[in-house]
Image (cartoon, grey):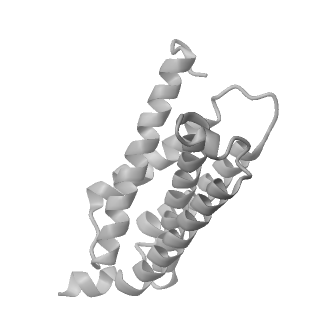
Amino acid sequence: MIVGLSTSAFTTVHVIISLIGIFSGAAVLFGWLGGKSSDRWTALFLATTVLTSVTGFFFHSASFGPPHVLGVISLVVLAGAISALYIFHLAGFWRWVYIVGATMALYLNVFVGVVQAFQKLPFLQPLAPTQSEPPFLIAQIAVLAIFVVLGFLSLKRFHPQASAAT
């Protein structure tokens, strides 16, 4: 926990950062589908998604568990995506690394959002109290399928060198 913030205040800040990451990530992803990119949306998405993963480690936990594993995976994937964009400038194979990495990071953020929704929202809690029930599994499979399709379409449609040349 960050010194000076109560648990509820820290949780609120973490959730706000996460939501900004999800919404800005959606803007980036839909831009790719149109063959475009926005430097501002991209920077906001990458920064808030890194911050979401980092702040997740500050929540009290008795042991290293699934949320920590997802945080580590997200940070590794983001390191690759950020390097692909800002160091390798999406040249050649790095465009693929960036799109897949950024899409995966956004998916992981949404995955956690679905988990939290089923844990916290009163109308979803009874549908999957242990998060092993069919409604939870169907929701997570649907989210995964959506991201696989959007990621694939982004790989086909987003070619920054081509759009810069036009």
Whole-percent x, y for residue 131 in the image: 70, 47
Q: Which one is in front, 142 or 26?
A: 142
Whole-percent x, y for residue 64 in the image: 79, 39
Q: Looking at the image, which residue sits at the far right?
A: 63
Q: For the point 78% across and 42% down, which residue is it?
A: 65
Please, is residue 16 above or below residue 46 in the view? above
Residue 63 in the figure: left or right of residue 40:
right
Please, is residue 3 above or below residue 60 in the view? above
Residue 32 placement: quadrant: bottom left
Q: For the point 35% across and 80% down, which residue is it?
A: 158
Residue 122 placement: quadrant: top right
Please, is residue 84 above or below residue 44 in the view? below
Whole-percent x, y for residue 142 in the image: 55, 66
Q: Which one is in front, 82 or 63?
A: 63
Indicate the quadrant containing the C terminus: top left, top right, bottom left or bottom right.
Answer: bottom left
Whole-percent x, y for residue 134 in the image: 68, 58
Q: How many numbered marks, from 0 up?
A: 0
Q: Which one is in front, 160 or 21?
A: 21
Q: For the point 64% across and 54% down, which residue is it?
A: 136
Q: For the point 49% across and 58% down, which residue is it?
A: 106
Indicate the quadrant containing the N terminus: top left, top right, bottom left or bottom right.
Answer: top right
Residue 93 in the figure: left or right of residue 47:
right
